[in-house]
Amino acid sequence: MNNLPHLQVVGLTWGHISWDLLALPPQDIILASDVFFEPEDFEDILATIYFLMHKNPKVQLWSTYQVRRQC
């Protein structure tokens, strides 16, 4: 479909390194879209991203961050 090679999608829980995550081949890009929402999750998100980037130093992280109003 769309002339793309076989793609693998793996669900994850931030901060938890699963067997599926360990078995992933090297990635080109980590797309982290709208993941920085709850400040209490930031440490787990960054720990997971660190693991993936340490495992594959050539990977690129694409992310955005939007400051949200505190109510």
Image (tube, rainbow, N blue to C red):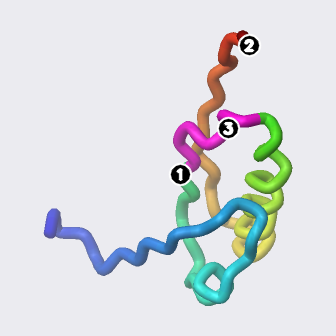
Estimate the spatial distance between the alpha carbons at disc 2 and disc 3, rounded to whole Å.
14 Å
Task: Judge whether 33 appears above or below 12 on screen.
Answer: above
Disc 2 to disc 3: CB gap under 8 Å: no
Residue type at mark 2: give it.
Gln
Residue stretch in magenta: 32-38
* Residue at mark 2: 70
Residue type at mark 3: give it.
Phe
Query: Of tags 2 and 1, which is closer to the observer?
Result: 2
Q: Which mark is residue 36?
A: 3
Q: Earlier in the sequence, mark 2 or mark 3?
A: 3
SS for callout 1: strand
What residue is shown at x 63% (from left), y 22% (from top)?
A: 66
Instruction: Judge the density around disc 2: few (<14), some (14-19), many (≥20) Cα neighbours within 10 Å.
Output: few
Q: Earlier in the sequence, mark 2 or mark 1?
A: 1
Q: Quadrant of the C terminus?
A: top right
The x, y position of residue 26, in whole percent, is 59, 78
* Residue at mark 1: 31
Query: Of tags 2 and 3, which is closer to the observer?
Result: 2
Q: Quadrant of the N terminus?
A: bottom left
